[in-house]
Image: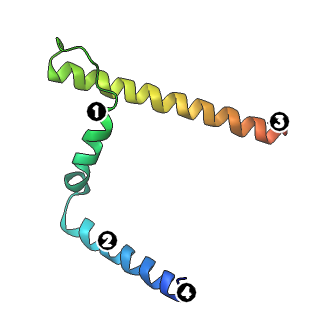
Amino acid sequence: MISPELRRARSFAGRIGSAVQRSRHDPREYTSAARNAFLRRFWPDDPNLSDEEAHLRAKAALRAHMLTMALRSAKVRNNRKRGKK
């Protein structure tokens, strides 16, 4: 088991490392592969679309997905506030 002191020290070291990395590089550089892989989940199956059009549609599908998640989250919060399950 990790002691609380060691946990805090590791957390602090990680925060320092993150700040140093962000000071030297644009975060979009080292997160672009992950963002593109995530966006591919929403990529349309139509092979007739150009890459540009497929990219626009994937971004729109992602936006729709996130808005749906936000709506569901708001409903759950409202129900909890009212004491419903």
What is the C-alpha distance between the residues marked 4 and 2? 25 Å
Front-most of 22 and 10? 10
In the picture, the quarter occupied by the C terminus is: top right
Mark 4, residue position: 3
| Closer mark to the observer between disc 2 and disc 3 | 3
- How far across and down, in percent of the image, does residue 48 sit? 16, 11
Pointer 1 local density, CA inside 10 Å: few below 14, some 14–19, many at least 20: some
Q: Amino acid at mark 4?
A: Ser
N-terminal of the pair, mark 2 or mark 3, is 2
Mark 2, residue position: 19
Mark 1, residue position: 40
Mark 3, residue position: 84
Front-most of 81 and 84? 84
What is the C-alpha distance between the residues marked 2 and 3? 43 Å
Position of residue 76 relative to residue 43, above or below, is below
Quadrant hosting residue 52: top left
Label 2–label 3 contact, CB within 8 A: no
What is the C-alpha distance between the residues marked 4 and 3? 40 Å
Q: Amino acid at mark 2?
A: Ala
Residue at the spot 84% in from the left edge and 40% down from the top edge: 83
N-terminal of the pair, mark 4 or mark 3, is 4
